Structures are given as structure tokens and as C-alpha cells.
Image (cartoon, helix red, strand yellow):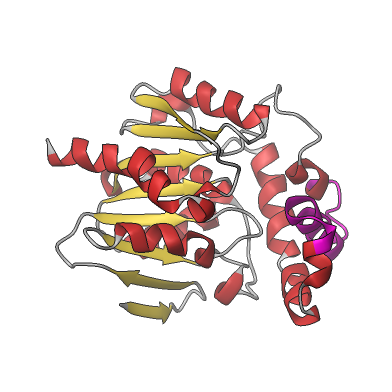
Amino acid sequence: MSEALAPDGVWRDEAGPDDGTFVVVVHGSMDRSSGMLKLSRVLDGTCRVARYDRRGYGRSAPHPGPFDMAGQVADLVDVLAGRPAVLVGHSYGGNVALATAARHPRLVRAVAIYETPLSWEPWWPGTTAGAAAVERLADPAGAAEAFMRRMIGDERWDALPERTRATRREEGMAMVHELADLRLHQPWSAEQILVPVLAGYGTKGSPHHERGMRHVADEVADAHVVTLVDCRHDAPLSHPALFAELMVAPLLARLAGG
């Protein structure tokens, strides 16, 4: 295992055999690479797996930004370091993966996304946690707390140590700006995605996430929808083995078969 804080202030680590298929996992908003750790450990027995804290989160905070998609893609390209990879993106991280595939097709072999928001689409609901966060651009700390309360519930939030809650509030700057940018600027278009894509959703998740993943499967030439039964939005954390089996293994098998 190797880990480092890069000169750009983005923390990353890698594990698994050097000759394994290179896989990079990308976390969502108000998360960090530890949210993808269980999945990484399932994969790194056979794959070379990199995970990183996106700018403004975890060990990559504080970060001066900007928190737009161009910066997100640049960070992921730095993690790739010229090595073509399978990208696995959870929630907002799926947009980072697809935007990288669109802008740097030679560096991306395949993409798996799970419940990735398509918030620029006119049919995307304005009542999501992300939409509520964008409405509080002037109060990023409050937006972060509201987001976390909505995601994990008041009881769990109130039980967190104050130091942890303070850290999450500080991450609000990254969250509100990246989500506002996502709403205003479509980060990729279907015709730009030329690699295999699996788009997953959980049966215990929100209906708009299922609609979004089916939309990706319908619009991207080589994309297919995957249903994870009894899973919620946190499937990479709650069901890492199932996630690896249904969302990643088929892409690895396809690449191995040429």
C-alpha cells in the first residue's frame, strides 16, 4: 500500500498487485475515500486500486478550490498518472468519472456509476438534498449540516463528536460549489462517452436515481442499467461485495476478454 498528499493538496493511496487491472474509485459529495474503502478492499485482491479524497473533503481539506468539474477532472487525471483505468464513481463521483471519460478517452477503459445525479436535466427534482444545499450557497457550513442531517438523520448527527461535526461543516464550501456548478454546467454528453458503462441504482433508493440511471443506459451507446436489490444510496459501503460483483466484475471480465 502507498499513500501520499500530492503537491496539489489531494490525498490518495493505492493497494493491490502492481500488475492488476487499474481501478480508481471516486466518492460523492460530503463523503471521502473511506466511504469507498470496503469496496476497494474487495477489489484490491486482484486489481490495483486507487482511492483519493476529492478536493475539499477528508484529508484533501481545506482546499482553495475551485470546485468546478474542470478541477475535479484534473485531480483524477493526476491520480491516473497516465495509466488507463476502470473508473468507479459513487453519486457525484460518477459525473467526475464520466467527465474524465469524455475529456480524456485514452485514460478511461470503462466506467461504473451508481446513483449519479443528473441535476442539470430539466426533469431532475428540485427537492433533493443536493438542490437544498445549492439554495444555501451563502451559508456552506449550514448547508453541510442540513445535508448530513438529511442523509444520516438527526439522531446520528447529534451523536457525532463536535470535532467531527465541525469538520463536516467545513466541507460545506466544496459541496455547495460543486453541486451548484453541476446544476449549471452539464459536465458530459452521451455522445462523448465511448467506453462501456454500467449505471446502477438501489431498489431502496429514490425514484429519481433509478430514472437517472435508466436515462444514462438509454442515451449512452454502450451503457447498461444494473439493479442492486435491497440497496440504498450507500451501496458501496453497505454492500461492497455485491457492488463489486454486479457493478465492477462484468466490466473487468469484458476487458479481459478483449
Q: Is residue 154 magenta?
A: yes
The quadrant of the image that shows the N terminus is bottom left
Q: Is residue 221 above or below residue 206?
A: above
Q: Residue 101: x, y in percent? A: 38, 42
**Picture residue at 40% right of the left edge, 38% below the top:** 102
166 relative to 53 in the view: left or right: right
**Picture residue at 74% right of the left edge, 63% below the top:** 173
**Picture residue at 65% right of the left edge, 71% below the top:** 64
Tell me, yes or no, if residue 251 can be seen here: yes
Rendered image quadrant of residue 67: bottom right
Q: Nearer the viewer, residue 222 or 249?
A: 249
The quadrant of the image that shows the C terminus is top left
**Picture residue at 69% right of the left edge, 38% below the top:** 184
Tell me, yes or no, if residue 111 can be seen here: no
For the image, the number of numbered tags is: 0
Q: Is residue 252 magenta?
A: no
Q: Residue 205: x, y in percent? A: 63, 36
Q: Is residue 59 above or below residue 77?
A: below
Magenta region, residue range:
134-155
Q: Residue 68: x, y in percent? A: 61, 53
167 relative to 10 in the view: left or right: right
